[in-house]
Amino acid sequence: MTSETLQKARDFESQYGPHIPDSERPAFHATPTIGWMNDPNGFSFYKGECHLFYQYHPYSNEWGPMHWGHLKTRDFLHWERLPAALAPDQDYDSAGCFSGGAVELPDGRQLLMYTGVQRGHNADGFIQDVQTQCVAIGDGVNYEKWGDNPILDGKDLPEGGSTIDFRDPKVWHDPDGSFYAVVGNRTAGGSGAILMYRSTDGLKWEFVRTLDSCHNQYGKMWECPDFFPMDGRQVLITSPQEMSPVGLEFHAGNGTLCLIGEYGPDKGFTRCSAQAIDYGLDFYAPQTVLAPDGRRIMIAWMQNWDTAKAKPCNCRWFGQMTLPRELSVKNGRLIQNPVRELENYRGARVIHRNIPVCGEINLPGIQGRVLDMTVTVRPTGPGLYRWFRIRVAKDGEHETIIRYRPDQGTLKLDRIRSGLPHDIVHTRSLLVRPQGGEIKLRIILDRFSVEVFVNDGEQVASAVIYTRQSAGAITFEAGGSAVIDVEKYDLVFEREEG
């Protein structure tokens, strides 16, 4: 039965959402029906279709009492809008239905597992949120919250675990027949940990182990975990809060972390390496799904909590997801590339090979704001060029710059002149693997974003931009002499939203 709170949200989005024209949205990135979007939730396949839920506040473009919005897709690029799935309408989730996962049950129903938040006062009289794990079960559109919620609360935590920071369950059905979930938690020492739980039916759960703890090494609280096998390794991803910067690998604040290691039911998880997931300005709370064809696909909130107030005036939606990415592990590192379905929407090919660059040039047919472009830069001889710049979304006032310094091995993403007139972080640099001055960059542009895939997905840097849509020039510039290959496709989409 649909509650009054949920029905109100559904009526609001159906009344006002359709009035937002397609031209005000990205061409192929997921956005909320109306209002605010943050973390992806319940990224899963159900009855052969891929569903994506998300943290949602329909009534404004600011964070508010969290609902679950709902989308589904056949190709990871066209997003069909479905009615809001969850609303904060019970005592145990009255302060919000926070992030979680989804899984198909053996009886054909879909289970949503989420964090319910209840607000109260602590012993000192300050407002304090208590977080528990809850479930709702439904048919892909309508969901009923379980009568015995919450299914996990303070009594199910290991000793010293926090009920204030206990959130974001990611659930899956294991080949052994059991359901498993990983949940973020904060330990008695104040640092993050990832807890694992097991269930035979998705409703009654037992604590298995603490998978890993940060011991204040990589930030504090670990949010939004995911845990999966891939290419013979085990991958644990999470989004730490209060990160300290570490060189050019990890930046300060809310970050992302990928731990690659080994896992066994007896010994647990042993980490072998640690890396950032995205090296750009806007990326948080990634979640993955195992597609029926065996691909592990990841999507994330393409935004940054520290820059989330830097939004256009009078925008009717705020927040978007990244382009979904295919994952793999190679040489102990996470590799990410755009989903291959993107190639189905390529228009005419424009290609230039062995073009010398000394100073700034543009090339015939290389422009646009919704495109897929690969640029390979090489030295012209034994000496290295000093730097190379690609300027996109450019006009007389605006540009977004991608700059490479081969002597330092650094790539820099600069959106200072990208239409965000706010005092926020606008540049970020990353250290790339040296290849004798050669670098390959695949640049995906949508109306309000740029995503740069470096050297066939070894690293990715994502950023939101709000440059006016008429700014479509692209130029190439070298300090010294370089030679480039450019292959560019416009991306052509027809909207198929419900």
Image: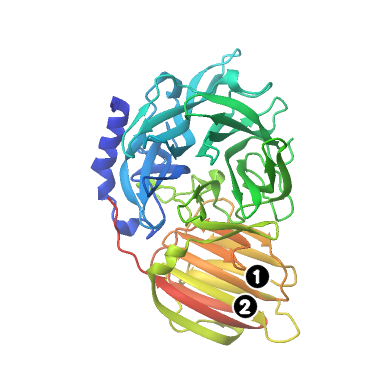
**Which label lies toward us, 1 or 2?**
2
Q: Nearer the viewer, residue 455 or 249?
A: 455
Instruction: Name which residue type carries label 1.
Output: Tyr
Instruction: Name which residue type carries label 2.
Output: Val
| Whole-percent x, y for residue 1 in the image | 28, 26
Is 182 left, or right, of 466 in this rendering?
A: right
**Quarter assignment of residue 341:** bottom left
Q: Mark number for residue 404?
A: 1
Q: Residue placed at 50% from the left, 78% from the top? A: 487
Question: Can residue 314 be seen in this snapshot?
Answer: no
Tally of numbered tags: 2
**Quarter assignment of residue 198:** top right
Q: Which residue is mark 2?
A: 377
**Quarter assignment of residue 82:** top left
Q: Residue placed at 39% from the left, 68% from the top? A: 344
| Whole-percent x, y for residue 230 in the image | 60, 52
Task: Mark 1 and mark 2 in contact? Answer it, CB < 8 Å.
Answer: yes
